[in-house]
Image (cartoon, grey):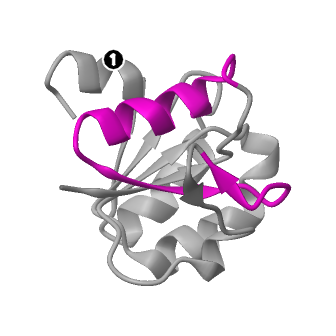
Amino acid sequence: MERVVVVGASNNPERYSNKAMKMLAEYGHEPLPVAPAVAEVEGHPAVASLTEVSGPVDTVTMYVGPARQGELLDAIVALRPRRVIFNPGTENPEAYARLDAAGIAHLEACTLVLLRTGQF
């Protein structure tokens, strides 16, 4: 079971971050929602920022656009996840060099597709 931080998690069932929360749990992973406006997402306690995440993290899956990622990058590097998934609309080539320097893998992909196709 992987611990997966979902940055930009939402309680809105129409949002892809909400669908990812549900699907990650369905596939046996432990989703950790980062959502400053809510206390929980899909029954999982939410934290307001990445700095509140404790313990090892396997994957960070990004659901916030590049304009809002600047302050998140330091926290991601500090978490030392194995990888960061940049979902459609969150691609950020400026962040990739920083992740490379920290030894953190990154990919532009859809978490939902990776799960459904056994590539997660």
Residue at the outermost left position: 118
Q: Is residue 109 visible?
A: no
Magenta segment: 13-41
Q: How many marks?
A: 1
Which quarter of the figure is the C terminus placed in? top left
- Residue 99 location, x and y as percent? 44, 61
> Left of 100 or right of it: where is 19?
right
Please tell me in which quadrant of the rendered image residue 65 appears.
Answer: top right
Name the residue type under label 1: Val
**Residue at image x 14%, y 24%?**
118
Q: Is residue 105 above or below residue 114?
A: below
**Residue at image x 74%, y 28%?**
12
> Left of 46 or right of it: where is 29?
left
Q: Is residue 1 magenta?
A: no
**Residue at image x 63%, y 38%?**
63
Q: Is residue 12 visible?
A: yes
Which quarter of the figure is the N terminus placed in? bottom left
- Residue 37 location, x and y as percent? 85, 55
Q: Secondary structure at mark 1?
A: helix
Please tell me in which quadrant of the rendered image residue 85 appears.
Answer: top left
**Residue at image x 32%, y 77%?**
56
Q: Which residue is mark 1?
A: 113
- Residue 43 location, x and y as percent? 56, 50
**Mark 1: few, some, or many residues within 10 Å (few <14, many ≥20)?**
few
Q: Nearer the viewer, residue 44 or 106?
A: 44
